[in-house]
Amino acid sequence: MRSKLLAVAIAAGLGVASFHVAAEPATKAKTTHKQTTTNQDSSASKNAEIELLKAQLAELQAKVASLEERTDAQSDINVSTGQNVEAVQKAQAVADKKVATYDKLVNNTKIGATMFFDMTDVNHKEAGKVGGYAKKDGHGWTNGTGFDVKRFYLVVDHKFDDVWSANLTTDFNYQSTLGQTSLFVKKAYVQGTFDPLFAVRFGAADMPWIPFVEKWYGYRFLENTITDRSIDGGRGTAGTAAQGMGSFGNSSDWGIHALGATTGDNSINYQLSAVTGRGYKNPSRSNGIDFEGRFGYSPIEQMVIAVGGYDGKRGNKVQNGAPTQNATRGDALVAYRDKTFGVGAEYFTAKNWDDVLKIAGPLPGPAAVRDKANGYSLFGDWTFMPQWAVFARYDRVDYKYWGLTGPQNKLKDTYYNAGVSYDVLKNLRLAFAWKYDKLEGPIKAFQYKTNEIGFWGMLSY
């Protein structure tokens, strides 16, 4: 713009000068010959100057035109550069948003795993109809040496915000006694945490009792707790397959779970669950809801006193099904654990756990129509030096069942283990142990005793 104004000014100046030169002879009518000659010379000089100025003006105009072309080209470049910068900024914003999303996903998601494994030798003997005990495979046992992956839990935890989160835990196992693998979804729930004393889980989640006791016991990789330990068979009539007297609870089930806890001395904890009753392996529907609850109190942080209970049909109340009666269970736990020492006692009592379905008609009926069980478990461990600990446990279960007629039948299961453990790494523990299990009852065909010795391990990460 400035170059154009300069060119106009120069042109105007030249125009004025030319007009002045042309008009000057007319203003002087009377001149001498000498003056005329002088004026002619002066006019020629001025014309030359004008021509020179015109040439300079043309050159200046050419330079101005060239400058304008360069300015226009630079403007196009600036516009293109601005557009490119804007596009890059937009792409960077999108990329930053994606990176932030990925970071949030990664930072708010935790993936872990826990594996229980063993390599042991089993010596299982059963009592025949006559004579003593003889080595025989049965009741879930296979004689010999084998390697098992009892449990492999793959855990994915994701936190959506300060309130909502989710958990997915798969349960894989391999047992040499079965010669096959199994895969289940043990936990799959959405959780809303509204207060330390109030959280709600929707889906398959830990039940109130068994997982709670496992944390205080500390050796779940070696053996299930007493209500979760399966006592295979041991009940029935001669000549029929053993039935009943399995475990007395589920570690996880499908439903709604409310829980909460405080920490430190004089703290409390609780959980209430309304579930289907068949456990995490069987999320089938029924016409009833089962309830399990727990309340615990810790006078000091290292100690807990807890009670719990269960009531329901265990998923057996179905449309057009057989009449049912409620299965019930009561629980109690007292335990202490610090960095070097742990000890505890668990007790349970159960009614109709195996006989939810009751007979509705004349004989012949089922082997039993009601049952009752009582059991207790004593456990302890001592870390006598860094990474090394000794442990032991004793269980006793008394089981009674009744038929439509006839006397009461009794079974007794005695179990204990002992061994030494070594923490190879922070997340790897190995144990060398011996287990013994003996079942006694009125029918010899369902009596057995088992010795198992070997290595057990737990790996977590």
Image (cartoon, rainbow, N blue to C red):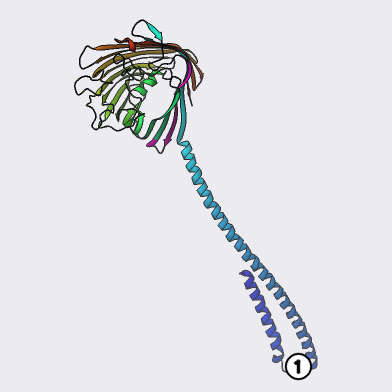
Does residue 164 appear to the left or right of 322 in the view shown? Answer: right
458 or 45: which is nearer to us? 458
Q: Position of residue 389 (x, y in %)?
A: 46, 13
Residue 21: percent from left, percent from top: 71, 85
Residue type at the position of mark 1? Thr
Q: Quadrant of residue 291?
A: top left
Tally of numbered discs: 1
Residues in magenta, as a range: 137-165
Which image quadrant for residue 87? bottom right
Q: Which residue is located at x 74 percent, y 77 percent?
A: 52
Residue drawn at point x = 40 percent, y = 8 percent: 134
Residue located at (78% from left, 88% from top): 40
* Front-most of residues 39 and 99: 99
Name the foreground residue: 417 vs 398. 398
- In which quadrant will I find the N terminus? bottom right
Decide whether the magenta segment is chiefly helix, strand or loop: strand
Residue 152: in magenta span:
yes
Residue 14 at x, y percent in the picture: 68, 79
Crowd rating for badge 1 (residues with CA inside 10 Å; few <14, some 14–19, many 20+): few
Residue 120 is one of the magenta-drawn residues? no
The answer to whether residue 8 is left or right of residue 405 is: right
| Residue 34 visible in image | yes
Residue projecting furthest to the left:
362
Query: In the image, is residue 361 above or below residue 397?
Result: below
Q: Is residue 33 above or below residue 421?
A: below
- Residue 438 location in percent, x, y? 36, 10
Disc 1 is placed on an element classified as loop
Residue at horizontal 48%, vertical 37%?
A: 106
- Foreground residue, 167 or 364? 364
Quadrant of the rendered structure where residue 62 is?
bottom right
Return the residue at label 1. Answer: 31
Would residue 425 appear left or right of 13 to someone viewing this image?
A: left
